[in-house]
Image (spheres, rainbow, N blue to C red):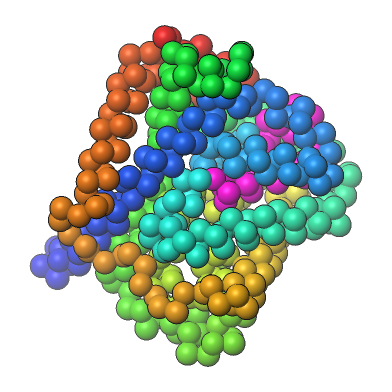
Amino acid sequence: MSLDVITAVGRALQMAAAMGWLLVWPLILGFGISAVIQAVVSHREMARLLPDDRPGSLLKAALLGAASSSCSYAAVAIARSMFRKGANFNAAMAFQFASTNLVLELGIVLWVMLGWRFTAATWAGGIVMIVILSALLRLFLRESLVEDAGAQADKGLAGRMEGHAEMDMAVTDGPLLSRLFSARGFTAVCHYFVMDWASVWVDLALGLIIAGALAAWVPNSVWSAIFFTDHPVLAKVIGPLLGPLVAVASFVCSVGNVPLAAVLWNGGASFGGVIAFIFADLIILPILDIYRRYYGLKVAVLLFVLFYAAMALAGYAVELAFGAAGLIPSTRAAHVADLGFSWNYTTWLNLGFLLLAAVLVWRFMRTGGPAMLRLMEHAAGPDDHHHDVTL
């Protein structure tokens, strides 16, 4: 291996590590808050709350999704489980979208890497996308296809993160605060915290490596040419169409695609294009294959088409609304450079949150956590599991 190749690889890994260090405290904070919510919101009641696709049910689906795990694979598996238990298919899809786009940890990471406008655009656009998707499903998903999807779902073919999706550790007895501050509640928080990290770390690491490589090896001029940056009107048209297609080929989902979103923004992708790219974690190739196993080929193809349309249309809506309000950033300065180590606020926040994470992991290890992880990883299919944590 030549010295130039070694230098290039080292540069990419250095940039990936720098971006990873920047994300330590936001991820710990986001997953911690998500774990607290999951510890008091039971998965068992979700299907009962989503009997149809009326606005009230869709709102519940969005709220339940926002309170769930941000792992795309787990969200897809939970949606299938809810559908099998009687939830409306359209509402289950709305839950799935909210679980990957309206969760707090995604918003925090976006804020740190790209700024608060991207966080606001993702949450606002996520709501718009769910509304658009629900309308498209009503128009194009025939009842016969829903029946076919139900028959295929009942076969129980495994996807990924089935154990994560079916593990229910929520504490539901007693008032909310007493549940949360009980020993059992704290243990559930610790288990959900570690379980969420276990489910996304591969995608997060892959996203950082891909983003580091692209940032180090691909000049911004290349991205500018791809996204027609020198033609502002055309760029706004192309961006939301091209952004999801880049995501499809990246194989990265959940918060792992945020570093690559930062690279695309710095490279010249339009605001709406970056938002559409972030939305597209639910149509990456591995997840499309899971749709095929879960619901059959016809439904999987239709879901891809409708999901892609909803993502692109939501990207256009965000571009127009935020542009009219003057909220699109005027500079492209997302944090993708090799910042290096220094005693700044990021370092102090990272050290503080790493200490908090150590406490949560210690509690996890002392209360049956490793056994839970083994059960989660070796679950063969979507059978219900209720994990009894040890105090």
Q: Is residue 49 above or below residue 148?
A: above
Q: Quadrant of residue 358?
A: top left
Q: Which residue lies furthest to the top in this view?
A: 391
Q: Can residue 236 be seen in this view?
A: yes
Picture quarter containing residue 92? top right
Residue 248, given in percent of the width and then of the height, sits at: 54, 59
Residue interval drawn in magenta: 79-103
The quadrant in which the N terminus is found is: bottom left
Residue 221 position (above or below residue 205): below
Seen at 30% across and 21% down, the residue is 362
Q: Is residue 389 magenta?
A: no
**Do we see residue 214 in this rendering?**
no
Furthest toward the bottom, the residue is 231
Q: Is residue 322 above or below residue 299?
A: below
Who is closer to the viewer here, 298 or 370? Answer: 370
Would you say the magenta stretch is mainly helix, strand or loop? helix
Q: Is residue 85 magenta?
A: yes
**What x and y, as percent, mark residue 51?**
82, 34
State the image coordinates of residue 255 (x, y, percent, origin top left).
45, 50
Q: Which residue is drawn at 43% across and 20% down?
A: 186
Residue at the (53%, 16%) spot, across then down? 178
Q: Work out whether residue 182 or residue 222 is closer to the camera in this orientation and state it.
A: 182
Q: In this view, does 144 lie to the left or right of 240?
A: right
